[in-house]
Amino acid sequence: MEEVLQSLGPDKRYADPSAPIHARLMAAGGALPLPPPQLAMVLFALTFDPETEVKDKANATLAALPDNVVSTVLQAEVHPGLLGLFAEQSADNLAHLELIALNPATSDATVCTLAAMPQSRMVDIIAQNQVRLLRCPELFEALSENPVMGQATIDRTLDFLGLPKRETDSLTETEDDPPVSDAPIAGIEISEEEFSDELVQELPEDAPKDEATSANICALIQNMTVIEKVKLARFGNGEARSLLVRDRNRMVASAAIRSPKITDNEVVQFAKSRALSDDVVRIISNTREWVKNYSVKLALVANPKTPTANAIKFLNTLTDRDLKTIMRSRDIPGQIVQTARRILIRKGKA
């Protein structure tokens, strides 16, 4: 309580435990000639009062403050504890919670709590605060575990971490996707030296598989935080990427597929995989550089996780032989099979 009292400055006299209890009770009722931020701070200090009656009255007054008064307080430079208390009291008031998330005085712990809320606008607001992201790795954890975090927000966050996405196909890029930029990234400094050699050194593709090394790489990655995995996605070797791209965390998987070290052969194998997330397959199918590769397009057409519009577009570029194989397949979505048949019929090849 002493820290809160000291933050009141001259208004400390209204909440000082040594003041007469009747004076503190009057203050706890909000009967003070103070602007909203200072009034709220005094009430907050009184919630720590040694007298239960004073404490309860202060809590009740804070909870009953009008919305316009609370909004003013939430935009002021007040004690982080007061903003945390309002975050608890305003659990159903998204407008108030957004003001709390935007206030630089809000503690990182409170923002992490807000970042876990299933509110897409809240996630977007917090993800754009690069100052907090730099100083609070736990915020990455909270954001990346939130199921409502959109791919555009993931993209912006990864851009900030130095993992810009490749050029996308304008026909498939959504309105929410951020524009591709050549501007330098002013984000977290990442060095390859942060990781052990077995995580970053690339081995020849024909090198024999070392089960012990693979198990160790798997164990190292499993013990990493989300931000550490995202950093590794930038410098990790093929074995590390193959694990990261399958990570259940959407931000980690997206970072892995955007690795600047990824090879064409890896992309083909990932495009074939039905075990990868929809997000990863969608990123591959929307990346212009990769879908110029015939093998990637063929793999995507056969993958049921590929967006239907993309798969149909790729069908028109396949050979008659591959179209016939697709037409006979029982593992490919019916709409794709039927479209392949129509293309062959149109060509007189069915």
Image (cartoon, rainbow, N blue to C red):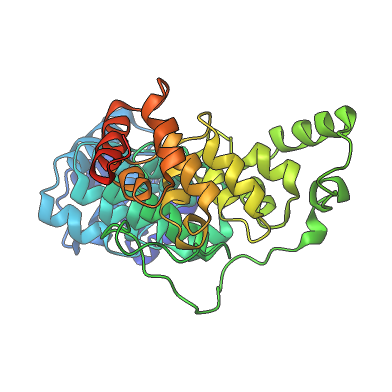
**204 to the left or right of 231:** right
**205 to the left or right of 350:** right
Which residue is nearer to you in this view: 16 or 325?
325
Vertical relation: 218 (above or below) 141? above
List x then y, in percent, for residue 115: 40, 44
List x then y, in percent, for residue 174: 28, 57
Which quarter shows the C terminus?
A: top left
Vertical relation: 218 (above or below) 245? above
Residue positioned most to the top: 330
List x then y, in percent, for residue 238: 73, 46
Which residue is nearer to you in this view: 190 or 269?
269
Which residue is nearer to you in this view: 82 or 34?
82
Q: Residue at x 17, y 43 (%)?
A: 29
Residue positioned most to the bottom: 183
Vertical relation: 315 (above or below) 259? above
Which residue is nearer to you in this view: 83 or 142?
142
List x then y, in percent, for residue 16: 38, 50
Residue 284 seen by the camera: yes
